[in-house]
């Protein structure tokens, strides 16, 4: 059986493209440090989040910025609601540069998104679930918080701010008021 030279050429080109596509997937999974958010954040009763009675739960505190229990970094507790982030929308979240920041994000009403514009921080916020992930910001600056999951008629207005400040300007004594 004779295979025409143009068929050989297209066969070779298609093999090169398949290998290139697989290579980009492998690089994307390994290279830039993209990782899936684990389920180690746990769950929370959505009614507890709606009521704001966070004293009843062991794995979620009142929304705010707190020094972590081990003294290394800070914990940020955020509640996403239609159509705001608490904290983040009315008052920017302030975190220190160069320290590990552990985000704990949940919602009680509908599915939201949590995306820090200009970073690779991006997760879904599902009612009854706590999305927990760690980030270290190496540079100071301001980042916009964007909801990237359609959450209702006011979705386009749901935004917030995160400020990364130098260690010397970060106030750890403010606790949940940051």
Image: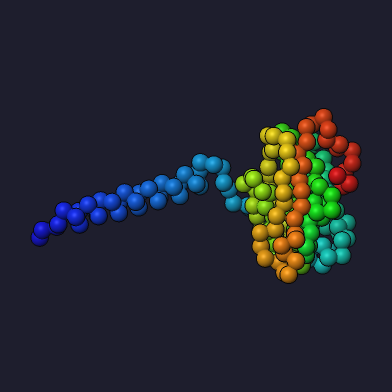
Q: Nearer the viewer, residue 106 or 150?
A: 150
Residue 30 in the image: state x and y as whole percent. 50, 43
In the displayed structure image, the side of residue 148 where residue 34 appears, left or right = left
Quadrant location, the N terminus = bottom left
Residue 64 location (% of width, % of height):
83, 49
* Left or right of 62 in this view: 161: left
Q: Position of residue 173 (x, y in %)?
A: 89, 38
**Rendering quarter of residue 123:** bottom right
- The answer to whether residue 72 is above or below residue 14 is above
Q: Residue at x 64, y 45 (%)?
A: 119
Q: Quadrant of the C terminus?
A: top right
Examine the image and state in which quarter residue 174 appears: top right
Residue 77 visible in image: no
Residue at 79 percent of width and 31 percent of height: 167
Which residue is nearer to you in this view: 158 or 28?
A: 158
Image-based side of 53 in relation to 151, left or right: right
* x, y percent for residue 161: 76, 48
Looking at the picture, does residue 82 appear above or below residue 91? below
Residue at 87% x, 47% y is 176
Color style of the picture? rainbow
């Amino acid at each position: 059986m004779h295979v025409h030279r143009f068929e050989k050429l297209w066969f070779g080109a298609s093999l090169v493209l398949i290998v290139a596509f697989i290579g980009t997937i492998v690089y994307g999974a390994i290279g830039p440090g993209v990782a899936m958010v684990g389920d180690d954040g746990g769950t929370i009763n959505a009614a507890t989040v709606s009521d704001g009675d966070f004293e009843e739960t062991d794995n979620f505190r009142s929304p705010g910025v707190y020094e972590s229990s081990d003294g290394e970094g800070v914990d940020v507790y955020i509640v996403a609601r239609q159509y705001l982030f608490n904290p983040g929308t009315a008052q920017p979240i302030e975190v220190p540069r160069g320290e590990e920041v552990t985000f704990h994000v949940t919602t009680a009403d509908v599915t939201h998104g949590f995306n820090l514009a200009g970073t690779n921080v991006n997760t879904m916020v599902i009612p009854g679930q706590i999305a927990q992930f760690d980030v270290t910001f190496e540079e100071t600056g301001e980042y916009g918080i964007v909801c990237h999951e359609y959450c209702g008629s006011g979705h386009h207005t749901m935004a917030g701010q995160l400020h990364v400040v130098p260690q010397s300007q970060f106030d750890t004594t403010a606790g949940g008021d940051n």
